[in-house]
Amino acid sequence: MSIQVRNLSHVYNKGLAAEQKALDNINFDIYDGEVVGIIGHTGSGKSTLLQHLNGLIKADCGNIIIDGKDITKQGISMRDIRRRVGLVFQYPEYQLFEETVAKDVAFGPKNLGLSEAEVESRVREALEMVRIDYDEYGQRSPFELSGGQKRRVAIAGVIAMKPQVLILDEPTAGLDPGAHKDILNLIKDVHERQNNIIILVSHNMEDVANLSDKVMVMDRGKLIMVGTPQEIFSRRDRLEAIALNVPPVTEMMYEVKERGIEIDTSPLNIKSAEDVIYNYLKRIEMNR
Amino acid sequence: MIRDITLGQYYSVDSPIHRRDPRIKILSVVMYIAALFIVENFIGFVMAAAALGLAVAVSKVPIGFIMRGLKPIIFILIFTFSINIFMINGRVLWKLGFLEVTDNGLYTAAFMSVRLILLIIGTSLLTFTTTPIKLTDGMERLLYPLSKIGVPTHEIAMMMSISLRFIPTLMEETDKIIKAQQARGADFESGNLIARAKSLVPILVPLFVSAFRIALDLAMAMEARCYSGGKNRTRMNGMKINSGDLIFMAANILFFAATITLRIWR
Ligand SMILES: Nc1ncnc2c1ncn2[C@@H]1O[C@H](COP(=O)(O)OP(=O)(O)OP(=O)(O)O)[C@@H](O)[C@H]1O
Ligand SMILES: [Mg+2]
């Protein structure tokens, strides 16, 4: 399983005053089992890009090759693409509609034409993965749940389709810290179990740094940087120029360095920052 | 997609039409609609189309934008056209089995379609060139005499402005929900009528939930700012009729008079 995107461009409202170039000649590769984080300021085209990857938006020009198949070609089965590529929208809880949680999660698998028994087992599995108790909540109305629970049910609805590529558009937007953490753990969990490709859009640099194998940076419809979290977040000035920043911990390291202390600014999480600071202090102590 | 529906949206540019007093524009549209139902011959329709064409040209709203607004009514257009063309008696022009196309039928069908198109373009030009706030302010002022006999004109105007304001929001919401359900494999295009009607449930339920959520939020926000209906409310920007408005109105009255003359004179 791999994804190749070549020369992808998209213009909204072509030919009108409101014409808007949302994607401009995008090129990238994603390999099997990768977790990819996409960052970019508001309106940089992240959501537009994601919607291209499962055919919800037709490309104006360019190719999207998923598992060797070019999905921009005529006569490609949309159903087949949607089975392989699952997309969880921003605020997915607003798409719940069934009478019960279980039925809602079953909507996707049913549309794939699976057998009753298979649907049932997938619903159970998906709900278990998002840590919603089937016996307690399965027969309840999804509208009675809390915001965080609704979000998890909505994500379960896509996970139950067992996509080989799972795309999440700002899955933690508007959640409290607890629910935020739950969602992140859930994503890690799904990745470990199904070893699928995960593509994650987030405005939280810390999450992107900690989860991703590869980070892609978008600016005004262009893909301007691709690299490991280490590579991307080592370019703080470049990121700041396009209204992005580095994770808080990294920011702290940069600021300490700016005040004249020769310290390594590469840590992306608290643990590695702690190591760097510890080693630094230790060295000073030894030299004393 | 569904967002392409332009009916009822505001098109933001500056033009002489945009600058006209909303009351004048509303009255003009009412007169124009009346005129469309008065004219009944070729010259009349040419005149009506020319008048509208002039207004469109002055308004700087692109033709493409206006034409997109017609898309949703294509079905209605075809429907009325077919009904009229086959159902009206007269001199038979063609025969297709039991269906007869008569000269009267053809005329009526063509006139009806043109009338409908002009009607839609005329009224949408009003919303394209007038912000919802101005539109409802104008409406409220025009209806003012009715409030003397107990009609809640302010509330009616407020309801109208809120509905207009939320058309694009709900469109966007619908678009998002459709895509989200498509991503879960929903299929809206195939199957028989019942299957298709059923496939709308995953769109309609979330849409209603969203609509209620938006309505509640809005009500809360209005209450937080002490809104309590029209009593004692005053306006920040009063409306004043200027010479441009008078000229515009005069042109309209002239057009209206011409259509009536044309009808009587024939
Ligand atoms: N349906 C649409 N019609 C017209 N323009 C659109 C549409 N959707 C997005 N755009 C425009 O395309 C550009 C990219 O939008 P997109 O939603 O992809 O940004 P984004 O990076 O996802 O932003 P955010 O972080 O706010 O979600 C924006 O300028 C936006 O205004
Ligand atoms: Mg987005």
Image (spheres, helix red, strand yellow):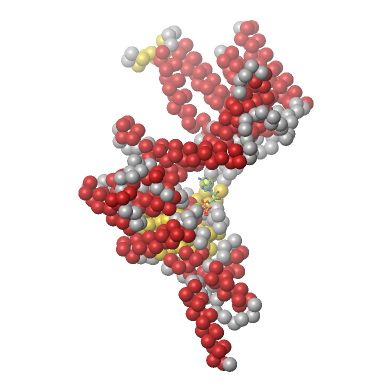
Residue that appears at 71% across and 22% down? B249
Foreground: B142 or A85?
B142
Q: Residue B3 at what x, y percent from top left?
A: 50, 39
Residue that appears at 68% across and 33% down? B18
- Quadrant of the image occupied by residue B243: top right
Foreground: B30 or A271?
A271
Res. B136 visible in picture: no
Q: Is residue A265 above or below residue A52?
A: below
Residue that appears at 44% across and 39% down? B209
Q: Is residue B216 above or below residue B229?
A: below
Q: Is residue A80 above or below residue B114?
A: below
Q: Residue A273 at what x, y percent from top left?
A: 51, 76
**In this image, A198 relative to B168: left or right?**
left
Residue that appears at 31% across and 31% down? B194
Quadrant of the drawing holding the N terminus of chain A: bottom left
**In this image, A179 relative to B19: left or right?**
left
Foreground: A262 or B29?
A262
